[in-house]
Image: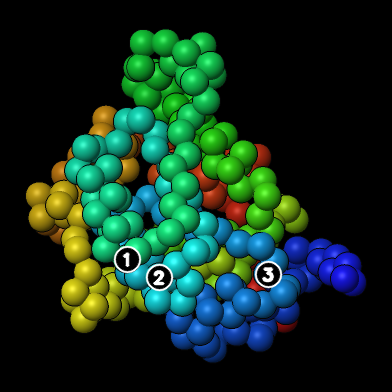
Amino acid sequence: MPLEAPLAPVAERVAELNARYRHHSATAVLEHALSDAQVGSIAMVSSFGAESVALLHMLSVMDRSVPVLFLDTEMLFDETLSYQAEVAEKLRLTNVQVIRPDRIATFHRDTDGLLHQRDPDACCTLRKTEPLKKALGPFDAWITGRKRFQGRERMELEFFENEADRRIKVNPLVHWTPQDVQDYMTNNRLPRHPLVAHGYPSIGCAPCTTRVAAGEDPRAGRWRGRQKLECGIHFVDGKVVRTPLAA
């Protein structure tokens, strides 16, 4: 059996992929990402949050066996854990992998479970960034549900990102609007995260997520009162990773 040709450098592949699929739809981008040799082995990372079910459903229609990595920080809302199980069963996802923080590292660095109060960045590193980095080790690419309308560091996202020349990040829903997400969920009769109806349009860990008032940014309830906008899984060496626009 002939050996597969090695993949080209990430930057080259990302530029070529963005040029090729720039005007495609979200479903077309996801379908190509699952089959294009330039993307390589791939997994989806999902928080099973307020809008996650749209992309998860899209994946389930194409290939239910694609690995779905779910980060259980052990500080999530009980509602999120129940919703994760419900969605996985309803969509018949066959390869959901629950990723948890390292027990020994947690014991040494968050003995009292209050690291999130003292240093939320360190807590996210311990409970999200480090476990995800390890889980993504075997993969050449991963799929995210990030969108430009979420603002701040996400406004310049493209379909394909270069993650520090290590792997490709695929953002199929990058151009979707909030209404696009809601329409997709309604049209496909997808279950809603129970906390959305209680004022949580963006849902993270329980200690660091609060309700959002009418008119506030949907992510205003994340790390409220702190100079923190992202958990860190989309950072490399402390910086947001973005892909330069293809020529």
Coordinates of residue 130 in the picture (x, y in percent): 57, 34
Q: Does the CB distance between marks 2 and 1 fall below 8 Å? A: yes
Q: Name the residue under label 2.
A: 60
Q: Between residues 158 and 77, which one lies in front from this camera angle?
A: 77
Q: Looking at the image, which is closer to me, 148 or 145?
A: 145
User: Quadrant of residue 36 in the image?
Assistant: bottom right
The residue shown at (10%, 55%) is 197
Q: Can residue 39 be seen in this view?
A: yes
Relative to 188, does residue 217 appear above or below in the rendering? above
> As drawn, which residue projects farthest toward the right?
2
Decide if residue 121 is in sight here.
no
What is the three-letter code of the residue carrying label 1? Leu
- SS at badge 1: loop
Q: How far apart are marks 2 and 3 (CA)?
A: 19 Å
| Mark 3 vs mark 1: in front | 1
Q: Quadrant of residue 88?
A: bottom left
Mark closer to the chain start, 2 or 1: 2
Q: Are marks 3 and 1 in contact (CB under 8 Å)?
A: no
Q: Name the residue under label 3.
A: 39
Position of residue 30 in the picture relative to residue 198 (left or right): right
Q: Position of residue 131 (x, y in %)?
A: 54, 36
How many dots with numbers? 3
Q: Residue 147: image x %, image y %?
A: 42, 66
Amino acid type, label 2: Ser
**Which amino acid type is marked by label 3?**
Val
What's the colour scheme?
Answer: rainbow
Mark 2: secondary structure: helix
The residue where tag 1 is placed is 91
